[in-house]
Amino acid sequence: MTAKPIFQITSFFLYVLVQGLLLQNVVAFDVAFCFAYVAFLLCLPVDSNALLLLGMGFLTGLSVDIFYDSVGMHAAASVLIMFVRNYWLNTITPQGGYDIGVAPNIDLNGWQWFLGYILPLIFLHHTALFFIESASFSLFWFTLLKVFASTIFTVIVIVIIQFLFYRSKRY
Amino acid sequence: MQRLLLFLIKYRAFLSFMLLEMVCLWLIVENNKYQSASYFNSSNKVSATLLSTSQGVRDFFNLNDVNATLAAENAQLKRQIEQYNQSLYSINVRQNRDEDILKKYDFISAKVIKNSTRKFENYITVDKGLKHGIEPGMAVVDHRGVVGKVKTASNNYSVIISILHGNMLVSSKIKRTGDLCTTQWDGRDYQRAQVLYLPRHINLNVGDTVVTSGYNAIFPEGVPVGIVESYEIQEDALFHDVQIKLLPDLNSLSYVYLIKNNLLIEQDSIENVTIE
């Protein structure tokens, strides 16, 4: 089980620090950004309290904002996906439902299900983030390009992280 | 009353969602205000220390490049000193006896610990702050040209609005003709910016240098901004569409100079009197 508070607190700091110090400098082809910290939010236990989820989204977003000098932007996008998350999880409930306290990571239902879970949410997060950042629709297509490129990049990085650190218990 | 409570409890997730989004919105708006002092940015102690350490590690691998740049800059400064020595008794210097005018600008060098170029609103963090005499509103240049303007400063660190920021306008002029214009970045390419409000009667050339105008008491006059790369004029437009190549390589900043205008308050207050 990955629901232990100590584990969550450690991974919170790890994700935020890696995002702020390392991934911030990773930009592919000038348009693809990597916001892997979203994985921390998406992998919080399924049956977490909705208010707690929103609070975590806000806190994580704000911590990342401090490193990005973009107060409120990541927080707004993160709170948004944390709000949508539970509805989305209910919609894609696998047969037999979720066990109590499981985290929706790659171990739970295999990578196809995991991809279907994170892809729309990450797309939503990035859409919100980049359009808030551009503060207008004047660069609509350029912003959209950034959104798509970053979504692909982030998803790839998150899946790699999942394969590296979350699957080890099975083998 | 009970109904209200039930309503609040039933929709508590949605309501707190709205509340948090409002807070975020307020933070974003507040942060975009000119020179707002806020704590949630990279000049606060914890994040700045972390960033400074991480930049320290990166610097280790960049030492060669930084050395080369500094050496080049040294050479350029030596050349300038030599030129000034040659013209020490030229008319300008003899007429400008006023100490205040001669010492109008102070230069403070600072090391960049965080930089971004590919967002729509880019900021730079440097390792000098209030303690070293940095104040919000000071101009920032590197040895090649304009870099930005100080937004906030904490005791040891300060955050600079990069010229690659949609709200950053730099009062400029074409060096050759002296025509006033404004430089702004459109958010696309970190090497190129746009020059606005250049009337159509002006004859531009590709390769013209754009420098700061010195009209706004922040930048000294004549700091290079960029070089005209292309320009066109629409049939019914009032102004040229000018694309310039920015002179400083903002992607590889390592040291910058913060310029303090000692006569800023005097100039601003006398201008305000006129406006009122």
Image: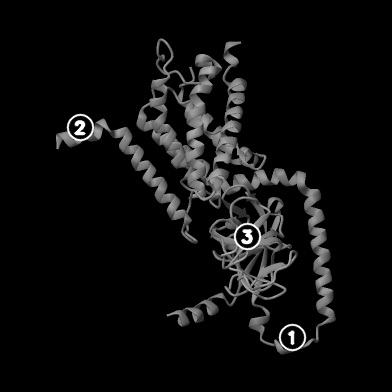
Q: Is residue B275 above or below residue B172?
A: below
Amino acid type at image mark 1: Asn
Q: Looking at the picture, how far across and down is residue A112, in whole percent?
A: 54, 17
Q: Is residue B157 visible?
A: no
Q: Is residue B95 above or below residue B230?
A: below
Q: Is residue B272 left or right of residue B42?
A: left
Q: Looking at the picture, how far across and down is residue A5, in whole percent?
A: 45, 26
Between the C-alphas of marks 2 and 1, the distance is 80 Å
Question: Mark 3 Cα within 10 Å, few/some/many (few <14, many 20+)?
Answer: many
Q: Which residue is mark 1?
A: B92
Label 2 with label 3: CB-CB less than 8 Å: no
Question: Circle 2 — which element?
Answer: helix
Residue at the spot 74% in from the left edge and 85% down from the top edge = B93
Dot 3 or dot 1: first in sequence order is 1
Q: Is residue A87 above or below residue B60?
A: above
Co-location on one chain, circles 3 and 1: yes
Q: Which mark is residue A76?
A: none
Q: Which residue is mark 3?
A: B194
Q: Looking at the picture, how far across and down is residue B174, in whole percent?
A: 68, 71
Tell which subunit mark 2 falls on.
B
Dot 2 or dot 3: first in sequence order is 2
Question: Circle 3 — which element?
Answer: strand
Q: Which mark is residue B6?
A: 2
Amino acid type at image mark 2: Leu
User: Considering depth in this image, is B124 or A13 the residue closer to the camera?
Assistant: B124
